[in-house]
Image: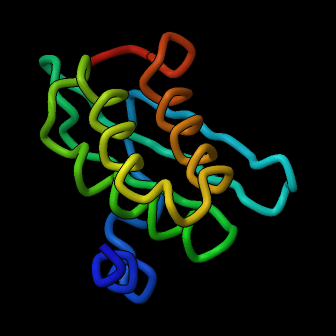
Amino acid sequence: MIEVLSKHMANPSNFGLLKGFTHCGSARGPNHEDFIAFQAIVGRGRVRAVKWSGTGCGLVMAAASIVAEVLEGKYWITVGLLAREKLALLKKYDSACLQVVQDAVDSCFGPGGNMNER
């Protein structure tokens, strides 16, 4: 898993802003140094596109990159569980950092992040 983390730290996937997003959400860590925001386009029950932006430690940035990559193309209803499963593989590193990413996913794809589905 360290190879995957290193890859995403050096070359994050899906980083940036997403035009025309239908869902968005963000979270900030307890130290206020970690901040992650997700934007997604959800249509016909699937995540059509997802991007993320933020600041923080390398683990937070890599985890957001990994999660964004995993969620694209998946059914909207399953994204919370998929993110939890992927982040669970990284828990041995720093669970507080990873919670920021999970909170941002929940904020984006939970009831509060659900905007007008297209």
Please name whichever residue, 36 or 23, is drawn nearer the observer in this view of the structure: 36
- State the image coordinates of residue 58 (x, y, percent, origin top left): 58, 77
- State the image coordinates of residue 59 (x, y, percent, origin top left): 55, 70
Task: Please report the residue visible at 76 percent of the width from the left and 49 percent of the height from the top.
Answer: 29
Please name whichever residue, 50 or 66, is drawn nearer the observer in this view of the structure: 66
Please name whichever residue, 116 or 31, is drawn nearer the observer in this view of the structure: 31
- State the image coordinates of residue 38 (x, y, percent, origin top left): 49, 45
How many marks the image carries: the answer is 0
Looking at the rendering, in which quadrant would you find the C terminus? top left
In the rendered image, which quarter is residue 93 located in? bottom right
Task: Please report the residue visible at 39 percent of the width from the left and 63 percent of the height from the top.
Answer: 65
- State the image coordinates of residue 27 (x, y, percent, origin top left): 67, 41
Considering only vertical position in the picture, is 106 above or below 54? above
> Left or right of 31: which side holds 113?
left
Considering only vertical position in the picture, is 33 above or below 32? below
> Left or right of 33: which side holds 27?
left
Please name whichever residue, 23 or 66, is drawn nearer the observer in this view of the structure: 66
